[in-house]
Amino acid sequence: MSPEAFDPEDARAALDDIADMRRELALKATDCPFWRHAVFAAITAVLVLASGLEWLPQAALSIAGLAGVAWVAADDRRRYGMFINGYRKGLTLPVTMALLAAMLGAVAFEYYARFTGLSLAVKLGIAAIAFLVALEASYAWNRAYCRELLGDAV
């Protein structure tokens, strides 16, 4: 690019357009309804619970959970025009890693409950705790994403 072709005003306008798009995206992200967070938490809890069950219900719940993930991704694409992977770098990654660690712990408890013969009530309790942790993590992820888009202005 020659120096004559560089227009600082065009560059500033392009950067302003990017900032405007990031603000618009942050507004869409903050508009995420409760049901969307709850669906994410329910899918997570179903996948955790599956690991505490025998192979047939485990397979059925795992398939249901994966179908739920596919449905959420498709719904996000339809609703927002995109689906954002939770394993992206940035301010959201620590939230994702903390949730992953917590859910791996919940799965370990489910396996313990399964192989020591603990009751279904215990397994459902573990899944309920996983639901609550995933629900809060979904809100925390959303807050971190908005902070990142707005440059910590939120």
Image (cartoon, rainbow, N blue to C red):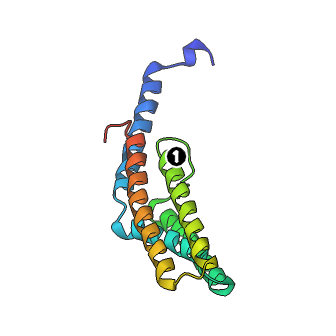
Viewport quadrant of the C terminus: top left
* Residue 143 in picture, x, y percent from top left: 37, 50
Task: Please name whichever residue, 45 or 8, is drawn nearer the observer in this view of the structure.
Answer: 45
Question: Residue reaching furthest front?
Answer: 116
Q: Is residue 1 above or below residue 126?
A: above
Which residue shows up at 37% across the image and 61% down it?
Answer: 32
Total marks drawn?
1
In this view of the protein, which residue sits in the foreground, 92 or 18? 92
Q: Residue furthest right?
A: 55
Relative to 57, residue 88 above or below: above
The residue under the point 40% across, 66% down is 132
Q: Amino acid at mark 1?
A: Leu
The quadrant of the picture occupied by the N terminus is: top right
Give above or below for 56 relative to 6. Answer: below
**Residue 83 location (% of width, % of height):** 53, 58
Residue at screen point 46% across, 67% down: 130
User: Observer-nearest residue: 127 or 74?
Assistant: 127
Residue at point 34% right, 54% down? 30
Give the class, few, some or many, for how many residues have Cα within 10 Å of label 1's Cα (few <14, many ≥20).
some
From the viewer's perspective, is 2 left or right of 146? Answer: right
Secondary structure under tag 1 reads helix
The spot of residue 105 in percent (x, y) is: 55, 61
According to the picture, the residue beneath numbered tag 1 turns out to be 93
The single residue placed furthest to the top in the displayed view is 3
Q: Which residue is farthest left?
A: 154
Residue 89 point in image, percent of width and height: 55, 43
Task: Choose between 62 and 152: the one closer to the eye.
Answer: 62
Residue 134, picture quadrant: bottom left
On screen, residue 153 versus residue 114, left or right, reads left
